[in-house]
């Protein structure tokens, strides 16, 4: 039963299939027609070598079409496809052969033209084997997939390199209307519809083979590299104009047209193209900004050195940083560069300050809120605080050291009082919170002027005022022509900055100068003296160099004469000379020559002594004038020895050369009557450090006493006890430095932090 | 040898002639008994030392900043006495003597 049943079922099925194939034709004519169509279709689709491409053209397209119709009616298309794909697989070696041949040539020459040839060749294969569209989308799609799978599987790894090369060449090609000779576009691909683009055919071929999709990231990386190399080429070291706008113009003129091909080829209208390019376009724009900001970040130190010529570069950087978040990197790079190039012992304090000021100005352009500046400036400020001459440098630039070139202060900047740290005013309607990347100890650095920023390196401005007094004293005492208008002007300016009270002492100094001038005029009107005195008020000038000697001979007479006149003019006052300060211009008339010299008073005093006696020992000379440092004495004598008036002999004896010695004539003697400059500018006022050391000497007595009475003491203990002493205001660090100095001199020893007097 | 001084730029400090011997050359100097500021400094109400803030000599040999003393004399508690020795304050004439003596 079952067998019969089954038999009947099979028969019915067979009948059914037969009818389908026979298409309801009488007899087997339908079947015949079907098998004819099958043969024709498979023959037509058969993938053959490109060489006998002509064979396909033999077919009558009408017949082929009708036979595919028959096949599709009898639902045999899937079978046909299977058959076709099987045939393709069998003939794939033909393609493989071509690929290998071209790639071998490329690998030999590294010339991307072989890649382009290969691409075109593959396209030829593709279209040669392509089934006709009448067979439907499914078959076409399956064919494409199979073809691409095979091609990709046989392409060697070197192809991606070659492809990259080829794509990078398209930038040049896209700009010309005729393809370069090496780009051999086969006639089939020469499309008349877009003749303006020489690279059109190439891109069309890429798309057909699915290369665009597969190598999308490669293509964009080619574009990135192209943009990078262009930026490096045009912008490196070019800081005097803004580059971002020209770069964007360049993008519009060069990159956007090129982008049309790989990214917007299917666009029908300009609007459509624009929306297709939007995503990739903004990626490229971002890349432009990133590359430029990377470049400028690398160059930042030199850009700052070049300020203000490099302002356009900084504006570029600012714009780029708004798009690309590279702020942290900028800070890092600049800090590193500063550490390497600025903050080392080889750099002049003045240079560091100049660069610091430039950094302030530059980073204010890039980042007005000052977050970047704060991060970069911190190490510089710390470093400057450790340098001993920072204050002096700042002060020197404050008063505009004429000969030291450009001042730190911009002449055009309005002079304003120093700004103290402001407490945030939350009631201010325009208050803004701190920027988001501000550090925890960021202080809102309200745009203050440069001097305020520099002064704020130190906690108090007193140090500056003190240093300022020293500097002013040095300058005023060096003035001989009575013209101190410049100093007056400086002080007036500084008064605005530091406040009137802080500069009261300087005011007194200036008044002393004016008074001296008046007194001097009066004295000169009474009696014609070669002496011009600057009479100063003690307690208002910084401590001046100690030194106490008496001018001998005629100098003493002149001084007394002057003092007498002064006393007549100001009966309540008397003069006390500071003999070691000032300069004397004198003529030395000898038997055979006259020498004109401008020397410090001590030198003049010694020479005066020689007018009474021809031979003196150093000790005699020192005794004759009072208390003089021996080195100072020797130095004074060497002035005259150099000029050739004195001669050093044995036993520290010096002899006056009334007649010039023959050989010294030749060797040493400068042409007579030429003024000899003072051997060296003697710093007349004690520097702040020297003053501190001087004061510390007083405290040493206390320390010595307590160590004698109490034995070993810790540093803390010493500090606590010293605080009882009047005027003691040192920090424990200063005390430690002082004790360390004392230890080096062998005065004290330290063990386990306990200090002890060193008793031999 | 003969030395001819052409020009001499010298520096000097002025001192009040208080009559005391010049022993304190390097010290801080004498101070006004009222404000404890050195004579060569200025009294608390002045800014400029010297002629703008002169001294006043008493017959009792005490010397003060003039402004300090006048202020003191101006108070009722002073009873017109020298603050140092409580003798009636008489301004000394030595300044005038010194001028006429010349």
Image (cartoon, rainbow, N blue to C red):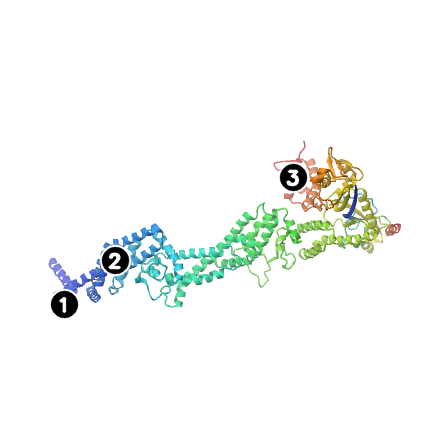
Residue A149's spot in the image, x, y percent?
A: 29, 55
The image quadrant of residue A256 is bottom left
Does the CB distance between marks 3 and 1 fall below 8 Å?
no
- Above or below, comparing residue B18 to residue A205 in the picture: above
Quadrant of residue A413 in the image? bottom right
Please say if the residues under marks 2 and 3 sit with CB atoms less than 8 Å apart: no
Q: Chain of mark 3?
A: A
Alpha-carbon distance for marks 1 and 2? 39 Å
Q: Which residue is mark 3?
A: A741
Mark 3 or mark 1: name the one nearer the start of the chain. Answer: 1
How many other residues sit within 10 Å of disc 3, few (<14), some (14-19) or many (≥20)? Answer: few
Output the chain of dot 1: A
Q: Is A287 left or right of A191, judged from the image as shown? A: right
Q: Is residue A84 visible?
A: yes
- The Cα atoms of the two marked residues, 2 and 3, are separated by 97 Å
Lower position in the chain sequence, tag 1 or tag 2: 1
Location of residue A55 in the rendering, given as x and y in whole percent from the top left corner:
22, 61
Q: Earlier in the sequence, mark 2 or mark 3?
A: 2
Q: Residue at x 32, y 56 (%)?
A: A117
A191 left or right, relative to A578: left
Element class at badge 1: loop
Q: Please state the total of marks drawn on the protein image.
A: 3
* Depicted A746 relative to depicted A453: above or below: above
| Quadrant including the C terminus of chain A | top right
Q: Which residue is mark 1?
A: A25
Q: Which residue is mark 2?
A: A50
Q: Is residue A347 left or right of residue A44?
A: right
Q: What whole-number distance in Å separates the C-alpha atoms at marks 3 and 1? A: 124 Å
> Mark 2 falls on what kind of element?
helix
Quick check: A708 left or right of A244?
A: right
Residue B97 circle label: none
Asked whether A324 or A125 is in front, the reply is A125
């Amino acid at each position: 039963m079952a067998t019969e049943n089954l038999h009947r079922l099979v028969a019915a099925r067979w009948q059914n299939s037969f009818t389908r194939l026979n298409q309801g034709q009488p007899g087997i004519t339908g079947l015949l027609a079907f098998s004819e169509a099958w043969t024709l279709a498979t023959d037509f689709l058969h993938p053959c070598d490109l060489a006998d491409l002509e064979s396909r053209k033999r077919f009558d397209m009408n017949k082929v079409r009708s036979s595919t119709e028959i096949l599709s009616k009898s639902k045999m298309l899937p079978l046909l496809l299977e058959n076709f794909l099987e045939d393709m697989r069998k003939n794939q070696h033909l393609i493989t052969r071509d690929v290998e041949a071209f790639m071998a040539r490329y690998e030999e020459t590294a010339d991307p033209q072989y890649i382009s040839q290969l691409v075109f060749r593959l396209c030829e294969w593709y279209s040669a084997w392509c089934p006709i569209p009448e067979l439907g989308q499914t078959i076409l799609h399956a064919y494409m997939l199979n073809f691409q799978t095979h091609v990709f599987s046989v392409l060697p790894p070197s192809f991606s390199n070659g492809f990259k090369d080829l794509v990078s060449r398209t930038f040049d090609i896209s700009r010309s209307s005729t393809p370069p000779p090496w780009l051999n576009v086969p006639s089939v691909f020469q499309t008349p519809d877009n003749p303006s683009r020489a690279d059109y055919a190439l891109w069309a071929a890429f798309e057909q083979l699915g290369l665009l999709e597969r190598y999308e990231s490669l293509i964009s990386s080619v574009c990135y590299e192209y943009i990078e190399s262009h930026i490096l080429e045009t912008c490196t070291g070019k800081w005097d104009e803004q580059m971002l706008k020209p770069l964007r113009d360049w993008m519009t003129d060069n990159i956007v047209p090129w982008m049309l091909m790989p990214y917007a080829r299917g666009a029908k209208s300009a609007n459509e193209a624009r929306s297709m390019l939007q995503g990739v376009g903004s990626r490229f724009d971002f890349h432009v900004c990133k590359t430029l900001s990377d470049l400028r970040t690398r160059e930042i130190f030199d850009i700052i050195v070049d300020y203000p010529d490099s302002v356009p570069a900084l504006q570029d950087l600012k714009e780029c940083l708004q798009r690309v978040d590279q702020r942290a990197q900028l800070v890092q790079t600049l800090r590193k560069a500063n550490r390497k190039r600025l903050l080392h012992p080889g750099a002049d304090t003045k240079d560091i300050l100049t660069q610091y000021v430039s950094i302030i100005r530059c980073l204010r352009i890039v980042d007005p809120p000052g977050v970047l500046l704060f991060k970069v400036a911190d190490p510089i400020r710390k470093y400057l605080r450790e340098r001993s001459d920072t204050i002096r440098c700042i002060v020197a630039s404050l008063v505009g050291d004429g000969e030291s070139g450009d001042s730190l202060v911009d002449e055009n900047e309005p002079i304003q009082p120093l700004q103290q740290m402001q407490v945030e005013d939350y009631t201010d309607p325009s208050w803004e919170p701190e920027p988001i990347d501000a550090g925890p100890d960021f202080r809102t650095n309200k745009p203050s002027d440069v001097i305020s920023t520099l002064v704020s390196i130190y906690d108090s401005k007193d140090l500056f005022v003190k240093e300022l007094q020293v500097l002013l004293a040095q300058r005023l005492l060096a003035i001989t022509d009575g013209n101190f208008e410049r100093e007056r002007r400086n002080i007036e300016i500084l008064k605005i900055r530091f406040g009137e009270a802080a500069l009261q002492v300087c005011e007194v100094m200036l008044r002393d100068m004016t008074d001296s001038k008046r007194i001097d005029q009066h004295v000169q009107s009474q009696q014609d003296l070669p002496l011009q005195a600057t009479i100063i008020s003690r307690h208002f000038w910084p401590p001046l160099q100690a030194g106490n000697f008496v001018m001998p001979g005629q100098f003493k007479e002149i001084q007394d004469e002057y003092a007498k006149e002064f006393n007549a003019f100001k009966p309540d006052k008397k003069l006390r000379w500071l003999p070691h300060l000032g300069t004397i211009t004198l003529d030395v008339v000898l038997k055979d020559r006259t020498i004109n010299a401008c020397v410090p008073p001590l030198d003049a005093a010694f020479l005066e002594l020689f007018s009474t006696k021809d031979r003196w020992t150093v000790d005699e000379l020192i005794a004759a004038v009072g208390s003089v440092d021996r080195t100072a004495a020797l130095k004074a004598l060497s002035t005259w020895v150099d000029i050739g008036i004195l001669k050093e002999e044995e036993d520290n004896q010096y002899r006056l050369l009334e007649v010039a010695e023959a050989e010294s004539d030749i060797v040493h003697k400068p042409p007579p009557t030429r003024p000899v400059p003072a051997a060296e500018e003697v710093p007349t006022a004690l520097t702040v450090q020297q003053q501190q050391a001087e004061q510390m000497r007083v405290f040493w007595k206390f320390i010595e006493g307590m160590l004698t009475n109490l034995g070993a003491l810790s540093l803390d203990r010493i500090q606590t006890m010293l605080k009882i002493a009047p005027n003691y205001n040192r920090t424990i660090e200063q005390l430690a430095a002082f004790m360390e100095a004392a230890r080096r001199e062998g005065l004290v020893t330290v063990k386990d932090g306990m200090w002890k007097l060193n008793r031999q | 040898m003969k030395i001819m001084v052409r020009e001499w730029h010298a520096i000097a400090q002025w001192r009040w002639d208080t009559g005391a011997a010049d022993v304190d050359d390097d010290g801080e100097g004498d101070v006004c008994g009222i404000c404890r500021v050195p004579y060569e400094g200025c009294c608390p109400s002045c800014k400029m030392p010297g002629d703008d803030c002169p001294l006043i000599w008493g017959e009792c040999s005490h010397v003060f900043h003039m402004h300090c003393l006048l202020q003191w004399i101006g108070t009722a508690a002073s009873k017109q006495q020298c603050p140092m020795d409580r003798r009636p304050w008489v301004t000394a004439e030595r300044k005038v003597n010194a001028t006429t003596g010349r």
